[in-house]
Image: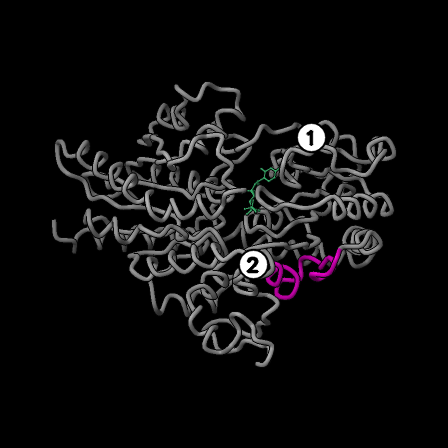
Amino acid sequence: MQMAHPKPHAVVIPYPYQGHVTPMINLSIRLASRGFTITFVQTELIHHFICKAQNLPAANFDLFAEARKSGLDIRYTTISDGFPLDFDRDLNFNEYWESMFRDFPDRVDKIVTTTMEADVLPKTPPFLLVADTFYTWPATIAKKHNMVNVSVWTEPAIVFSLNYNLELLRQNGHVPYNGNADNHINYIPGIQSFSTRDLMTYLQDPEAIPMLIKIAEKGFEQVRKADFILCNTVEELELETLSSLNQKHPTYAVGPINFYTDFTKTSIARSLWSESDCTQWLNSKPSGSVLYVSFGSIAHSNKEEIGELAHGLLISEVYFVWVLRPDIIGGKESDVLPEDFKDVVKDKGLIVPWCNQNIVLSSPATGGFLTHCGWNSILESTWFGVPMICYPSLVDQPTNRKLVVDDWKIGVDLCKGEQVRREEVASQVNILMRGESSVQMKQQIKKVSKKLHDSLGAEGSSHRNFDRFEVDLKAKFCTRSP
Ligand code: UDP
């Protein structure tokens, strides 16, 4: 569907992490292909990461140059987060986010102002601000500039709803959980049968990293004022939760945004790290025999945990591709695996610092995914019909785990929050990848995978919801005073 002229102009601002940048790029391409002008605003840090990963000079690199050649109107610019590139944002998490609350909004405001001033001829277009829900300023800035405010939620609807109902959780003694009340949560609209142990880690233990709950609280103050919420989920998978959210705010399930574009064909760089090619190795392995192991872009580990996982993989005798980021245990220690591990493993395992996850998951050789339960990883694994061993560690991961294991039955738990043990790793690998249980799990994930694929089809719910969003957005522009 084409919009009336002049073309709406969306200023798009992703959250500066891998799992948020990728969906925002895909969403921008979708909007541009539907006739929107896009100004994509990337933090300088992420820009440098992507350039380094591609071996390209950061000074001249335009992420969307190729997309423009194919006729899409996507402009690209960068914004400073206020810190030098070599500043360790993980190590100085509090300082970084305090500054993002305090100083970043002014910089966003300037970019929005410049972008709008530059696009008034021959006629001023309707402007919209498309920003991540976790940001603490979108409603304020959109209001100031009379823009329509579209909030983009890159996690499941259930996590949105729990954040949205934080006050209710507090009133019931479940955040923080005082141990007195029943740990069963049954009063959140659209969420049935939920336990405190499935809450996001920053709600289970707000004091562990207080900045996390602060970010969520500030973001959710703003999202209440958003005009539209786009959610990277699928209606058929979270129907009740989405229905109840929709009664409060216009919420559109438009996922999986991860597969808006063909991941094998796109010319737009998304990866923050250089990708090792695993294809040849995977091609040499029997169908369904390889376990893919990755804990995403943020989660950290320690030597003991990695040691147990490594020995567990050895005991299981499974083939594996293991993504071990160089910063996986923090700092610069590179020697994280048990002594002689690589010699013992030989051709059984391929250990890489980073890879193209979708290429690995789509390989016929891949039969299981030992995952930290990041939402993108879950969507990607489900899309390719790869059952999961769930090993969540922080933020939304325990909540995502519940969907995979308890609700959709497309994965198994690993150690349920207890210290990981090698014997359990081996046993869960067996359950997931061998015998009758594995056949059942594969049949079940095929059904869920079909829901994801269908949702993006011409008659699918996400396709329909995106159309509906576009119509409602257009109506909103018409009712806006100039
Ligand atoms: N990813 C990747 N290569 C890797 C590991 C991860 O491309 O070696 C991508 C993965 O495909 C996913 C994202 O990084 O899209 C991680 O997002 P997720 O939400 O799963 O976890 P997070 O990194 O946010 O914890």
The disc placed on residue 278 is: 1
Q: Position of residue 311 (x, y in %)?
A: 83, 45
Few, some or many residues within 10 Å of mark 2 (<14, 14–19, 20+): few
Secondary structure beneath dot 2 equals: loop
Disc 2 to disc 1, C-alpha distance: 37 Å
Considering depth in this image, is 107 or 127 the residue closer to the camera?
107
Residue 294 position (above or below residue 454): above
Secondary structure beneath dot 1 equals: loop
Residue found 33% across the figure and 42% down from its top: 104
Residue found 52% across the figure and 24% down from its top: 52
Q: Position of residue 174 (x, y in %)?
A: 53, 74
Give amino acid for label 1.
Answer: Cys
Residue found 69% across the figure and 61% down from its top: 417
Displayed-image quarter of ligand 1: top right
Q: Under 8 Å from ligand 1: the CB of mark 2? A: no
Q: Position of residue 313 (x, y in %)?
A: 81, 45
Residue that badge 2 annotates: 208
Query: In the visual, does 133 lie left or right of 420?
Result: left
Q: Quadrant of residue 367?
A: top right
Range shown magenta: 400-419
Query: Which residue is at the far bottom?
Result: 181
Give amino acid for label 2.
Answer: Ala
State which tag comes first along the sequence, 2 or 1.
2
Few, some or many residues within 10 Å of mark 1 (<14, 14–19, 20+): some
Foreground tag (2 vs 1): 2
Q: Position of residue 208 (x, y in %)?
A: 56, 58
Considering depth in this image, is 426 or 205 the residue closer to the camera?
205
